[in-house]
C-alpha cells in the first residue's frame, strides 16, 4: 500500500465533516484487500492522537476491543510470571510501596536505554500476545475484533491484520493533550519523536480518522467508520 505525505491514496478517510471521503479512495464499505490475511482489525495512532478514545467508542458500538497497553499492565501484575521476570531483569527498586511495579520508574529506566527497552519487550510482548489471542478466541464468532496497538508501524506487523485503522491528529493537538496528562513539553516531544513518523503510520492505513476537534466530532467520525469495520468482519466470516 502506497501513501503520500498528506493522504494515502488507498485509504478511506473519515474527515472533518464526519463523512467518509471517496474520490481516489475506496468507498467506506469497501473491504481492504488484505482482509484474508487476518481476522482482527488493528487500531493505532501516535501518542496523544486519540486512539484510546476511538477504542472506547468502538466498544460501545459493539466491537470486542483488546488494548495492548492494558494487557502490558495486566501481565506484570504482582504474582504473575511477568512480574517476576521484570523484577529479576531490572531490580527490586522498580517495585513501588504497594508491591506492584512502579511503571513511571520502569519507563525512566527503559526510555533512554535501547538495550533495557529490548529486554523489557522480550519479556512483556510474548505475554501480551498470548493473552490477546486468548481474549479474541473467547469472543463471539461474528464480533468485530479490534486490537489497540500503539506501536504497529514500528513493528512492521500491519499485514497480520484484516485492516488497519489509524487515528491521526496534528502534532500541536497531540502535544497539548500530553501536556494535559501532566507531561512537560520536552517530555511530550521526546515521546512523540520516539515513535514512528506520521508518514509511516499513513502507509499502513486502510482507514484514517482525523481527530483534531471536539468530543462530538470524535464520536461522529467513529460512528461513520463503524459500517466499514462491520464489512471487514462480514468478509472474514463469510463461507468460502
Image (cartoon, rainbow, N blue to C red):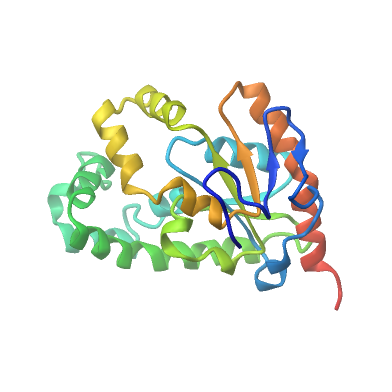
Residue 153 locus on image (x, y percent): 47, 57
Image quarter of residue 58? top right
Work out whether residue 56 or residue 197 is closer to the camera in this orientation and state it.
197
Work out whether residue 103 or residue 146 is closer to the camera in this orientation and state it.
146
Q: Using residue 103 as the reference point, say whether residue 162 is left or right of it.
A: right
Residue 204 locus on image (x, y percent): 56, 58
Above/below status of 155 relative to 150: below
Q: Residue at x 77, y 52 (%)?
A: 26
Above/below status of 218 relative to 113: above
Camera sees residue 84: no
Number of numbered discs visible in the structure rendering: 0
Work out whether residue 122 or residue 184 is closer to the camera in this orientation and state it.
184
Q: Residue at x 56, y 27 (%)?
A: 212
Q: Using residue 203 as the reference point, say whether residue 122 is left or right of it.
A: left
Above/below status of 198 relative to 163: above
Q: Residue furthest bottom?
A: 240
Q: Residue at x 31, y 33 (%)?
A: 188
Camera sees residue 5: yes
The quarter of the rendered structure image containing the C terminus is bottom right
Q: Residue at x 56, y 42 (%)?
A: 167
Residue 231 locus on image (x, y percent): 81, 55
Image quarter of residue 108? top left
Residue 171 locus on image (x, y percent): 43, 32
The quarter of the rendered structure image containing the N terminus is bottom right
Above/below status of 183 relative to 1: above
Q: Using residue 27 as the reference point, say whether residue 217 is left or right of it.
A: left
Amino acid at each position: 500500500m502506497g501513501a503520500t505525505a498528506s493522504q494515502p491514496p488507498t485509504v478511506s478517510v473519515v474527515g472533518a465533516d464526519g463523512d467518509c471521503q471517496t474520490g481516489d479512495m475506496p468507498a467506506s464499505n469497501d473491504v481492504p484487500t488484505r482482509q484474508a490475511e487476518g481476522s482482527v482489525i488493528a487500531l493505532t495512532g501516535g501518542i496523544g492522537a486519540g486512539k484510546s478514545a476511538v477504542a472506547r467508542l468502538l466498544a460501545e458500538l459493539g466491537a470486542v476491543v483488546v488494548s495492548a497497553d492494558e494487557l502490558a499492565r495486566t501481565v506484570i501484575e504482582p504474582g504473575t510470571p511477568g512480574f517476576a521476570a521484570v523484577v529479576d531483569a531490572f531490580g527490586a527498586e522498580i517495585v513501588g510501596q504497594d508491591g506492584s511495579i512502579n511503571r513511571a520508574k520502569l519507563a525512566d529506566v527503559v526510555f533512554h536505554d535501547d538495550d533495557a527497552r529490548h529486554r523489557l519487550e522480550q519479556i512483556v510482548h510474548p505475554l501480551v500476545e498470548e493473552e490477546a489471542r486468548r481474549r479474541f478466541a473467547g469472543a463471539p464468532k461474528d464480533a468485530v475484533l479490534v486490537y489497540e496497538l500503539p506501536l504497529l508501524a514500528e513493528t512492521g506487523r500491519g499485514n497480520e491484520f484484516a485492516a488497519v485503522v489509524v487515528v491521526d491528529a496534528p502534532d500541536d493537538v497531540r502535544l497539548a493533550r500530553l501536556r494535559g496528562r501532566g507531561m512537560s513539553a520536552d517530555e511530550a516531544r521526546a515521546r512523540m519523536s520516539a515513535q514512528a513518523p506520521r508518514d509511516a503510520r499513513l502507509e499502513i492505513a486502510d482507514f484514517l480518522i482525523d481527530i483534531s476537534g471536539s468530543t462530538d466530532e470524535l464520536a461522529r467520525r467513529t460512528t461513520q467508520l463503524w459500517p466499514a469495520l462491520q464489512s471487514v468482519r462480514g468478509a472474514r466470516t463469510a463461507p468460502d
